[in-house]
């Protein structure tokens, strides 16, 4: 038995097992609990509630979610890939400027666009009021106007804010393509359109597929848009099953089906590529020569880049700014500043903890680069692929059980009732945020840490520094860029997160996102204008940094 234990410790999984490895595995295991609980709930015995859901609304959830994925996938692909090709391969007025501005819609969550466009396009909104005054129409019987509160409207809102995921990755892929490849297609008689379809697009397929996959994951995570537009999807079904029916197990099973759907999308895309590989004959040392567009195509290209930015960012932001300015007393009421404090506090705490955990995880993998540590780090980042509503269910169920066990034990031992120590507090909310957004900070920290030469670790150890001292005194000062990026990204994501906050938040503890959702549901967009504008402005900071880096690299 002793010989077997020694062999197990010498295996690749346990090689170099120490306290640091144990901490990394413990962090990964803790963050994986909500995901594993939701995933395993699909094997639990289905009760009458699940049978009722299957007979009544499950087919509608599947159908609406499928149409939503199809519409958003096609829309983000068309806008993201089209604009990326225009700004990288063509020259037209202000093409370099559009390279950065096309990222601006990332700052605005889809649910804010849904509320704003509904107000602008409503019967008493500025658009229809202007049309009635222009044409002399008196009532709704005199003209027809499309209703944005529908499945098509939800698709349109999500496409406007999610296409930058595809655009960013497609643009990088087009810039990395070797000039000789595109020049060879020109020598073979391909015009710009044929060169794009037969050469550039196939070579960029992995990056485009990754961008579309990210957009589809965010689509399945959306709650505010589909709820406000009355589109029943898995996310709204999870919320209703949890709150209206009071059935956590059925909600967990719906969340598990949603996870299976996401996993299926990823496997379907990878399987479609099979053994295909996307190599280039030489490294791209310079950007390919651009196509100089004639006047009319150049004008159309500028319009194609202008419309997504105007519709996805400029118009909603200006309208919210207008409401906040002219109705400042209602918009900046007495509740605005406490809500802002709650949101900023949650975002700051989560961002600080997430980056701290990312430093431990990334440095642990650097110290022990075996496949066991790699698996633990990847498991810790698994939550980003899971919708916030599913993570909320997976968080509340175990914490609720732990609260009940602790309360029962203290009642029996000391006669003290503790109530909800975890599941009814901010602790549960921060934990759910960490599960959801740990991958965001981990990616930023890990990319910065890999740029530090291993020789610096050896030099620090020769000076008597331990592993913790080396991390704090050597690596952290050299990683300020990646660390600040991770803090900023997690901070913004927490500020915008709605589904998990809506399910887990403690009583009488609202955030800006929650209050915007509540005001918009009550058709009180004037009161929602200031919180919505604050969320957009906070989200604008990292987007502006990203825009600057994009244009600077070119």
Image (cartoon, rainbow, N blue to C red):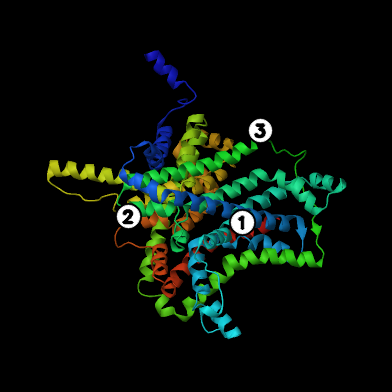
Instruction: Please give the name of the residue rendered at 41% of the width and 51% of the height, measured from the top-left corner.
Output: 57
Pointer 2: what residue?
A: 243
Whether residue 3 is visible: yes
Question: Can you tell which quarter of the image residue 301 is in?
Answer: bottom right
C-beta proximity under 8 Å, tags 3 and 1: no
Residue 73 location (% of width, % of height): 59, 52
Whether residue 381 is visible: no
For the C terminus, the image quarter is: bottom right
Ranked by sequence position, the earlier of labels 3 and 2 is 2
Judge depth for marks 3 and 1 and give the one in front: 1
Against 470, residue 7 (above or below) is above
Judge depth for marks 3 and 2 and give the one in front: 2
Residue 533 location (% of width, % of height): 48, 69
Against 121, residue 288 (above or below) is above
Against 343, residue 26 (above or below) is above
Label 2 environment density (alpha carbons within 10 Å; few <14, some 14–19, many ≥20):
few
Task: Check residue 275 in the rendering and tell me which mark sits there, or answer none.
Answer: 3
Ranked by sequence position, the earlier of labels 3 and 1 is 1
Task: Check residue 75 in the rendering and tell me which mark sits there, or answer none.
Answer: 1
Residue that sits furthest to the left in the current view: 415
Ranked by sequence position, the earlier of labels 2 and 1 is 1
């Amino acid at each position: 038995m002793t010989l077997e234990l020694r062999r197990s410790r010498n295996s690749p999984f346990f090689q170099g097992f120490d306290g640091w490895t144990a901490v990394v595995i413990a962090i990964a295991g803790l963050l994986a609990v909500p995901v594993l609980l939701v995933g395993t709930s699909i094997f639990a015995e289905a009760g009458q509630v699940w049978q009722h859901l299957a007979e009544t609304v499950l087919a509608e959830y599947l159908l609406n979610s499928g149409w939503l994925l199809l519409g958003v996938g096609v829309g983000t692909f068309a806008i993201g890939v089209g604009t990326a090709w225009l700004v990288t391969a063509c020259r037209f007025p202000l093409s370099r400027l559009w390279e950065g501005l096309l990222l601006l819609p990332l700052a605005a969550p889809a649910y804010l666009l849904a509320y704003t466009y509904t107000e602008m396009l409503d019967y008493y909104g500025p658009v229809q009021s202007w049309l009635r005054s222009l044409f002399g129409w008196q009532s709704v019987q005199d003209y027809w106007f499309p209703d944005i509160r529908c499945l098509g409207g939800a698709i349109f809102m999500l496409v406007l804010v999610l296409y930058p995921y595809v655009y960013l990755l497609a643009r990088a892929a087009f810039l990395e393509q070797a000039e000789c490849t595109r020049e060879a297609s020109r020598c073979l008689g391909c015009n710009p359109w044929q060169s794009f379809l037969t050469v550039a697009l196939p070579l960029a397929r992995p990056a485009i597929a990754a961008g579309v996959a990210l957009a589809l994951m965010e689509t399945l995570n959306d709650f505010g848009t589909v709820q406000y537009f009355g589109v029943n999807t898995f996310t709204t079904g999870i919320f209703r099953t949890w709150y209206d029916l009071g059935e956590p197990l059925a909600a967990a099973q719906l969340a598990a089906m949603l996870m299976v759907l996401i996993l299926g999308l990823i496997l379907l895309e990878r399987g479609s590529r099979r053994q295909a590989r996307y190599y280039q004959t030489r490294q791209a040392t310079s950007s390919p020569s651009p196509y100089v567009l004639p006047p009319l195509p150049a004008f159309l290209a500028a319009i194609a880049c202008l419309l997504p930015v105007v519709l996805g960012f400029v118009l909603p932001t200006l309208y919210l700014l207008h409401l906040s300015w002219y109705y400042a007393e209602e918009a900046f009421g007495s509740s605005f500043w406490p809500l802002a404090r709650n949101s900023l506090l949650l975002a700051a705490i989560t961002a600080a903890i997430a980056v701290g955990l990312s430093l431990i995880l990334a440095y642990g993998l650097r110290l022990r680069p075996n496949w066991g540590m790699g698996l633990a780090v990847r498991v810790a980042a698994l939550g980003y692929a899971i919708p916030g509503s599913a993570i909320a269910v997976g968080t509340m169920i175990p914490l609720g059980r732990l609260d009940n066990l602790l309360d029962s034990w203290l009642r029996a031992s000391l006669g003290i009732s503790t109530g909800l120590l975890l599941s009814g507090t901010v602790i549960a909310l921060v934990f759910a945020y960490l599960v959801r957004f740990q991958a965001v900070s981990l990616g930023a920290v890990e990319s910065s840490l890999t740029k530090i030469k291993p020789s610096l670790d050896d030099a620090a150890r020769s000076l008597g520094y331990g592993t913790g001292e080396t991390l704090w005194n050597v690596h952290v000062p050299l990683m300020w860029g990646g660390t600040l990026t991770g803090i900023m990204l997690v901070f913004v994501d927490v500020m915008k997160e709605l589904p998990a906050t809506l399910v887990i938040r403690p009583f009488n503890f609202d955030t800006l996102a929650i209050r915007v959702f509540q005001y918009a549901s009550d058709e009180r967009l004037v009161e929602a204008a200031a919180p919505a504008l604050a969320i957009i402005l906070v989200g604008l900071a990292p987007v502006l940094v990203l825009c600057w880096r994009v244009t600077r690299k070119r």
